[in-house]
Image: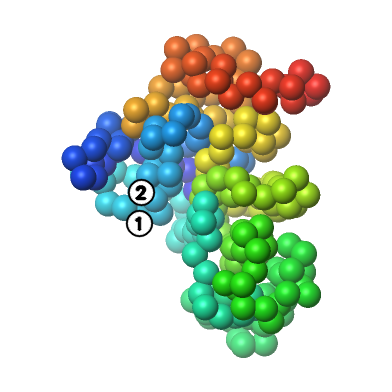
Amino acid sequence: MPALDLDGLVLTRNGTRILDGLDARIPAAGITALIGPNGAGKSATLRVIDGLLRPDAGSVLIVSQGPVRRAHLFQRPALLRASARANVALALVPLGLSRTERAARAHAALVRVGLGHRADAPATRLSGGEQQRLALARAWAVTPDLLLADEPTANLDPGATELVEGLIAEMARQGAKVVLVSHNLGQVMRLAADVVVLARGRAVEQGPTRALLTSPEAPETRAYITGEFPWTSFAAAS
């Protein structure tokens, strides 16, 4: 599992400072959640980690014993104008698998997310929830070392949310490091071992999930958690 060292990240776009000297040490094991208000820089942080955005200053160090295979789940899945099956199989081409192996793995991934019966359907004609599950199938199929998940259940119904959460947890158990962005603090409590709180482009607090969510120290964290009240019902029942 790779560990991540984010050092002094600065990112400015259209005159707006999105990341403002962000420092964070993300451990190798398990699931780390990035939380914070809208505009805090969470999605930008994932994109910088993935190399999709180049920071103006600072660095991302991925500490690993070998090459790191990455997968990124976006809030709105980026899908090819092809069948669901082809979307998964094409993601496997860089792995050097035979066509037979790619087909078998793609089929298994679609079945795993409940889309086996939709394998030949055009990906762009799937419902929003089905498209997100397809994106997860594509990520699951490549067995990533690092999974970056940006609000992966934001537009899903409870049943699909449970399935996606289960798959993300399974990928972490199988060895993937997961960095999860979520506003659903119940989900964060269920999945994440530790949390990094972002505010105004900086990391203002980090620690074990339950301790941080129940006894936050930074005023920015307290303000954010107070505003996201639904999670408290879950916490009280746990």
When asked about the image quadrant of residue 133, the answer is bottom right
* Residue type at tag 1: Leu
- Check the image and report above or below for 12 versus 67: above
> Looking at the image, is 210 positioned above or below residue 30?
above
Residue shown at 76%/18% (left/top)?
236
| Amino acid marked by disc 2 | Val
Judging by the rendered image, the residue that carries numbered circle 2 is 48
Identify which residue is drawn at 23% across, 37% down.
16
Residue 24 in sight in this render: no
- Residue 52 - label: 1
Rendering coords of residue 198 (x, y %): 42, 29
What is the CA distance from the residue labelled 2 to the residue labelled 1?
Answer: 6 Å
Image spot of residue 183 (x, y percent): 56, 34
Total marks shown come to: 2
Mark 2 touches mark 1? (CB < 8 Å): yes
Which residue of the protein is positioned furthest toward the right in this rendering?
A: 237
In depth, the one of 150 and 140 nearer the eye is 150
Say which residue appears at 62% left-offset and 87% top-offset.
99
Residue sitting nearer the eye, 98 or 40: 40
Q: Is residue 172 left or right of residue 196?
A: right
